[in-house]
């Protein structure tokens, strides 16, 4: 046995195929240190013979809490909402898979989770949980705990068109009057430019170009989110004031750290809705929908609107186009006036057929 005591703990010192192995066991008992040396020699021998010991597979709950979430927090420092989404998703996932070893999670178990979860929340919410689990288990594959991801191949639930709400001009005025200054600035930027909430929260001073009246969005949900956003008069004044008063890189900083961006205005938003007595309520994100609908109703063509909103596909832009009841009534009046005009012209003999345009 080649163990010896040094600094209060035992070390081993031996040669293996011409290489000196000298390491601390961290143990204070000589017998236990001798066992540690024997285990180390066996590991080296197995490695030379091409024997690979399987890495012990943790249970899902320990893996998520001890490995995945600490990694996610570091990985998503610039996108804290992404990390928060995984923190939210972990609760139902751990409730269902928590005590299972990672290699015991099968596609059949995932399907059962999908069925159970879809009876509790919306299809969209169920899909977000499945997406979070898929990401977690992809990380487990990179850690070599599992060889395949059981979520791969699972069909997500159809979500439908989703919920969109267009805010009226009257509602907007009441809401902004009830909102405090920070929320009012964020909401105005959204409804005037169509930016996403997190895009407004993370506006950096260096990306604002007041001389040419635009700001640059460097990143987002897709590569198409990277774009220049033209400033209206209202947003120009807001950003000009915030650039002058910025104490850090962000124009909408975190209240405790000017070097970090704002992360949420959820409470302030619903406080403003309550004070303004707006029913039914709308989400902060609906101000982006409102920008899209108003732009379309103002005559902005869809390809241009697609670029303004940072969409990857024009079909996504079309989902944001929602005429208000007033515009629908106006459209009906225009059609009615056109039909009357055509019938009158026909009786006067001025047109050959109301179904064809004059040549």
Image (cartoon, rainbow, N blue to C red):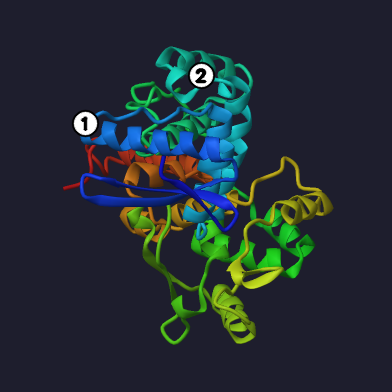
Position above or below: 101 against 47: above
Looking at the picture, how far across and down is residue 14, in whole percent? 34, 47
Looking at the picture, how far across and down is residue 76, in whole percent? 49, 54
Position above or below: 38 against 78: above
How many neighbours does mark 2 have within 10 angstroms: few (below 14), some (14-19), or many (20 or more)? many
Q: Quadrant of residue 272?
A: bottom right
View extreme (front): residue: 1
Q: Which residue is mark 1?
A: 50
Residue at position x 59%, y 79% from top?
A: 248
Residue at position x 60%, y 41% from top?
A: 87
The kind of secondary structure element at disc 1 is: loop
View extreme (left): residue: 359
How many neighbours does mark 1 have within 10 angstroms: few (below 14), some (14-19), or many (20 or more)? few
Residue 188 appears in the rendering: yes
**Front-most of residues 60 and 220:** 60
Quarter of the picture containing the N terminus is top left
**Front-most of residues 70 and 183:** 70
Residue 354 appears in the rendering: no
Looking at the picture, how far across and down is residue 72, in whole percent? 50, 48
Looking at the picture, how far across and down is residue 233, in whole percent? 54, 77
The kind of secondary structure element at disc 2 is: helix
Q: Which residue is mark 2?
A: 114
State if disc 1 and disc 2 touch (CB < 8 Å).
no
Q: Quadrant of residue 229?
A: bottom left
First of labels 2, 1 by sequence position: 1
Residue at position x 27%, y 34% from top?
A: 45
Disc tally is 2
Q: CA distance from mark 2 to mark 1?
A: 41 Å
**Front-most of residues 257 and 138:** 138
């Amino acid at each position: 046995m080649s163990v010896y005591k040094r600094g209060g703990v035992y070390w081993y010192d031996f040669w293996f195929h011409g290489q000196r192995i000298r390491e601390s066991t961290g143990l204070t008992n000589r017998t236990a240190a001798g066992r540690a040396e024997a285990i180390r020699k066996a590991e080296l021998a197995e490695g030379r013979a091409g024997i690979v010991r399987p890495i012990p597979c943790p249970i899902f709950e320990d893996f998520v809490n001890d490995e995945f979430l600490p990694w996610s927090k570091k990985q998503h420092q610039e996108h804290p909402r992404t990390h928060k989404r995984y923190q939210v998703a972990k609760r139902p996932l751990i409730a269902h898979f928590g005590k299972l070893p990672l290699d015991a999670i099968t596609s059949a178990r995932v399907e059962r989770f999908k069925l159970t979860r879809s009876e509790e929340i919306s299809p969209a919410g169920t899909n977000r949980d499945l997406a979070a689990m898929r990401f977690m288990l992809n990380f487990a594959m990179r850690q070599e705990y599992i060889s395949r991801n059981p979520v791969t191949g699972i069909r997500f639930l159809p979500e439908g068109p989703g919920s969109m709400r267009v805010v009226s001009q009257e509602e907007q005025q009441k809401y902004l009057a009830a909102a405090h200054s920070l929320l009012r600035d964020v909401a105005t930027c959204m409804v005037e430019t169509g930016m996403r909430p997190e895009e407004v929260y993370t506006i950096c001073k260096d990306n604002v170009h007041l001389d040419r009246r635009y700001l640059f969005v460097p990143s987002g949900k897709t590569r198409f989110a990277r774009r220049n956003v033209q400033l209206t008069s209202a947003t120009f004044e807001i950003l000009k004031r915030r650039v002058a008063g910025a104490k850090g890189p962000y124009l909408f900083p975190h209240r405790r750290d000017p070097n970090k961006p704002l992360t949420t205005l959820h409470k302030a938003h619903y406080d403003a809705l309550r004070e303004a007595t707006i029913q039914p309520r709308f989400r902060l994100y609906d101000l982006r929908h409102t920008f899209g609908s108003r732009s379309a109703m103002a005559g902005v063509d869809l390809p241009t609107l697609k670029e303004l909103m940072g969409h990857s596909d024009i079909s996504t832009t079309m989902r944001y186009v929602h005429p208000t009841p007033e515009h629908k009534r106006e459209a009906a009046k225009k059609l009615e006036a056109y039909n009357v005009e055509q019938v009158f012209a026909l009786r006067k003999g001025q047109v050959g057929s109301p179904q064809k345009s004059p040549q």
